[in-house]
Image: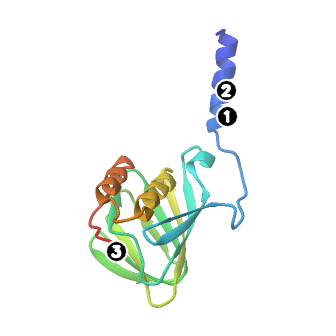
């Protein structure tokens, strides 16, 4: 390969990784279910150069994920609908629409939609990767029979996170 060919190949590789501006309308994202919740991922790492994941989560009343900690990414929730109980490093706080919840990496957290109405919130992670984890977790949790919790813990660890306590 000549130096010119190598330069062209490097440019092509860079432009494949460089995110481009985009508009994603409701219904155009990728819907994924896990832990009883559904997230429509509007932006994934493939679209943002692995810098950001953005999803719109729909959570049934009374539901939420198991307590967990992300070691590799920061997470942000923008509460749109419903009343949420947020657990952050040992304390529970009740919040409603308009609330911003920032969860820096290393924070043990979970949430539960309180009351009898479902919740909706934007969820953002930086850097990206959460969308891939959530899809794999959904496959494990929706498989016939009892979920393989050892496999779930293993992929959680692969993605730089840890489930603190979970018994479905």
How would you rate the neighbour count of disc 2 (Cα within 10 Å): few for under 14, some for 14-19, many for 20 or more? few
Decide: is 77 above or below 162.
Answer: below
Decide: is 125 above or below 98.
Answer: above
Name which residue lies at 66% across and 18% down: 7
Residue under label 2: 11
Residue 53: image quadrant is bottom right
Residue under label 3: 87
Question: Residue pushed farthest front?
Answer: 145
Residue 68: image quadrant is bottom left
Residue under label 1: 15
Q: Please tell me whether mark 3 sits on a helix, a strand or a loop.
A: strand
Percent across and percent down for residue 152 are 35, 56
Asked whether 146 or 99 is in front, the reply is 146
Q: Contact (CB < 8 A) between labels 1 and 2?
A: yes
Horizontal side, residue 21 vs residue 155: left or right: right
Asked whether 155 or 49 is in front, the reply is 155
Question: Residue pushed farthest top?
Answer: 2
Percent across and percent down for residue 16 are 65, 36
């Amino acid at each position: 390969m000549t130096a010119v060919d190598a330069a062209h190949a490097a440019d092509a590789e860079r432009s494949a990784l460089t995110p481009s501006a985009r508009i994603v309308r409701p219904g155009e994202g990728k819907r994924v279910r896990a832990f009883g919740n559904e997230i429509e991922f509007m932006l994934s790492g493939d679209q943002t150069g692995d810098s950001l994941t953005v999803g719109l989560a729909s959570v049934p009343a009374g539901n939420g994920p198991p307590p967990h900690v992300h070691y590799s990414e920061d997470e942000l929730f923008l509460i749109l609908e419903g009343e949420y109980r947020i657990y952050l490093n040992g304390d529970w706080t009740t919040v409603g629409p308009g609330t911003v919840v920032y969860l820096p990496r290393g924070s043990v957290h979970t949430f539960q939609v309180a009351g009898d109405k479902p919740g909706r919130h934007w969820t953002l992670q930086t850097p990206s990767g959460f969308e891939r984890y959530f899809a794999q977790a959904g496959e494990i949790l929706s498989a016939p029979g009892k979920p393989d919790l050892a496999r779930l813990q293993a992929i959680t660890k692969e993605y730089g996170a840890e489930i603190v306590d979970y018994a479905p």
